[in-house]
Image (cartoon, helix red, strand yellow):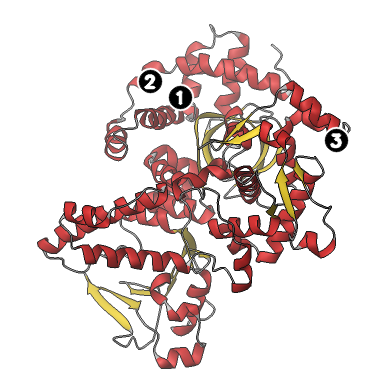
Amino acid sequence: MNIPQDWESRCDLYDTQYEVIVSMFEDYASKLDVDALVSFLMEKEPDNKEYRYSILDQYIISQTMGNADQLRRILQNNNTVLPPQTRQVLSHWTLNPGFFLAFRIVERKKPELFEIADLLTDTHYLFCSPSLEMLQERRESRNVTYVTLMLDNGLCLQCAGLIHYNSLQADDIVFTCRMFDADLYAKDGLDGVLKEYPQALYYWDYLSFIPSITTQGKEMLIHMAYVDELSYDFQSPFWSIQSKDGATQYILEEADEDMVEKYGPSDLLEHPELLNFRIFQLKQHWLIFAFAADAFSLLCRIVGHPDTEPLYRLSVPLVMNLEQDYPMPWDPFKLAGDEKEVEPADKKEIAALNKVMAKYIEALNSGKQFEIEKEAHKAGVDVELVEEFIAQLHKTMAKYSYNVPEEEKQYELDGWPVPPGSQRKGFGDDLYDSSRFLLQEPEELIERFHGYTQDRYLQEVEEEGLFGFLEDRALEEFEDETLGYMSLNMLLWILLHLSDRPVLVRSIALEIFKLFPLFFRTYEFDEYVELLSRVVFKCFIQTSLCSVAERPRGEKRTRGLYTIQATPMLKALISPIH
């Protein structure tokens, strides 16, 4: 029986045969011991039945379709009764059993067909996946790290079960695998570990909803390395020193004068607590540890190991989550800190204060009012203590917010609804999937658009839709798609809410800069203004969707010192959702 040679027909065939072959494993699958996995998932995700089922289902598939011996057994036991195509597909999978792969997207070749690269080996594959196509529609799952169980059909890969996504890098994957079973990882790699320890997927999936943590404008990544010997005088009170179970931990609390004189004043030494400078003296090694590359490099120089390279660069949220359940290299210590004994009364007060602060942060993120006195009394916490913690929170937040220079304050905008923190994530979405806007593209309006633009964009709009066309033009200006989507969404949000008056482009750029720290960590302000001005010109001025008093040129254009206003057509095509 001939097997199709084009990838689409091949994928359709293997999809059909997959269902037939999986059903042949029902008896074997029912005997698999899944009690430990079920208990783990019930503990971690008691209210998410769909997720628990997906993990369990993928595990069972990995033990059947990913097991060459079981595939051979099915083939031998059923060889004479199998239809020719089923026999041919099963024979291929017997030689190419399913395997887990962590990967990134290299290129979208066609809708649902991607070139991908193994995150750990950089081996390239073709991957056919409607699910991966759908994941590109949302900011949090677009162009990130993916992990799934793969099946080879001879022309490309197809996946079996859930595609997991997160912001992890290769070091995170390797660290987790070695933590679960270093010997198995050395022997069978990622595939062997995930088939034996599917629980690892939960810790990675947990990161899919957790944003990266930053401090002082840098992403916080744990940098760590072992050294065999270390000779340094850890002086108190500059270093806090704690010993436990034969190990010692040294935490830099404050830089002494000699340190500042030798390495110069810097933000790193001004606030060492933010970057977690630590040295661990363990039974056989010393461990150098910090939360950023430059902090790690500086710490290595301070303790006399200037050429040390980090063994790992790890996600802080990942490690914090793993640390709750498994011993880390710095065991018996905890990054979260469990060394200080807390009196029961203090514990109750701390727990109550944490609840009040959690409510405050929730109110802050959702834009709701928060009655400090009422909530403090309800929790039995001192009002002044709550006010002190709230003041400290805003002080900390201010460190990582854009500080508007005096000369730019004249350009700040008012009169538009600033989206609260809980709603800002949606501004990174594709407009067609947005929860922030209502889009309408009736034929009559599209024809009027083509009339205004003299059919210059007829083909692009027919292929992508009007807003898909605008997105494509905007994203051309950005290396990072997320920044492109956020810029376009916020530009429309401000324009449509202030549609009764002309708005300065520089003012729009400034409000975006103030709202999203990602922008001022990526661009200088004038650089971003020029970039946003190019988007405005291509997407809104050339397309007649915004009106201008005069066509901007030269410095006025590059510095965003001109106004634009939404036209009636733009307001008819798209409106903000409140």
The numbered dot on residue 28 is 2
Residue type, numbered disc 1: Gln
The reply to whether residue 490 is in sight is yes
Mark 1 near mark 2, Cβ–Cβ under 8 Å? yes
Residue type, numbered disc 3: Thr
Q: Nearer the viewer, mark 1 or mark 2?
A: 2
Mark 2 near mark 3, Cβ–Cβ under 8 Å? no
- In this view, the residue in front, 537 or 88, is 537
Q: Position of residue 78 (x, y in %)?
A: 50, 11
The reply to whether residue 304 is in sight is no
Q: Position of residue 171 (x, y in %)?
A: 51, 56
Q: Which residue is mark 3?
A: 453
Marks 1/3: CA distance? 62 Å
Q: Residue at x 21, y 56 (%)?
A: 376
Displayed quadrant of residue 248:
bottom left
The numbered dot on residue 70 is 1
Q: Residue at x 41, y 67 (%)?
A: 396
